[in-house]
Image: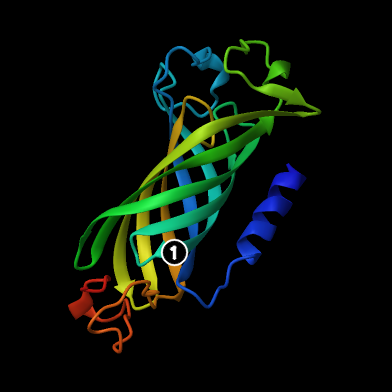
Amino acid sequence: MKKALISLVILASSFNLFAQSSMEFRLMLFGLHPDRAVRQDPSMYENRMDDNGTFIFEPGLMFSYQKYIYLTTLSLQFSQTMFSDAAAKMAGSTSMLLKYQFFHKYKFAMSFGMGPSLSYRQDWNKINQYVPNDGYIINGVWQTKWMLAAELSMYLYVRSNSDISLSIHHGSSYGAGSIAIGYRYWFNSVANIRTNCNDCGNKFSKGKFKHWWKRHM
């Protein structure tokens, strides 16, 4: 787990913070466990909200650094989570997503991202009801698993350098998703113009409502 954290820091620090980039803090609230094939005995889910263990209270934190590589459309997001999982054990994940903003209207925007994620948790094999059918590998006192992460995010502009967010994230736990609310802070909201345009002399600023967060080419 320490190696994953160090790798995330190195990757994030390799990008220029003075280019268009942001960081985001999220409060993870609930876990969704719809996959019956890997769902465990509900009795081991201490914070379950229903009898089947589909909805579970899984509090935690997520920190993300987002670097835009093309205007406000494409970005790379490096994320680190730490939370209490379905079995009330400490868990976390380290992921890198390629995100695409597919909708934007005035103060509201939506994006979708996918990429690799390393999920880890305290060993569930010590729980009597646990059935090892989810592909996790024992690594000391931890279990780890590589998987494909996905994220749907919704952002609402509140200030020139601030957004609030609501997101659904898959990749912190296998066969499960999480719902989180967050705050995104922009280090720099100036878009990098990579093609010729007639109005390149006017620098884009996310704070100017008339631009609707994107440059009109």
Locate residue 68: give its quadrant.
bottom left
SS category of the residue bearing label 1: strand
Q: Label 1 sits on what residue type?
A: Tyr
Residue 85 image position (x, y, % from top left): 57, 33
Residue 152 seen in the current view: yes
The image shows residue 158, relative to residue 166, as above or below, that is below
For the C terminus, which image quadrant? bottom left
The image shows residue 71, relative to residue 38, as above or below, that is below
Residue 183 image position (x, y, % from top left): 43, 62
For the N terminus, which image quadrant? top right
The image shows residue 105, relative to residue 78, as above or below, that is below
Q: Nearer the viewer, residue 155 or 18?
A: 18
Q: Nearer the viewer, residue 87 or 120?
A: 120
Q: Residue at x 67, y 11 (%)?
A: 128
Q: Residue at x 55, y 51 (%)?
A: 79
The image shows residue 48, relative to residue 30, as above or below, that is above
Q: Residue at x 58, y 12 (%)?
A: 133
Residue 197 image position (x, y, % from top left): 26, 78
Residue labelled with disc 1: 68
Q: Nearer the viewer, residue 119 or 192?
A: 192
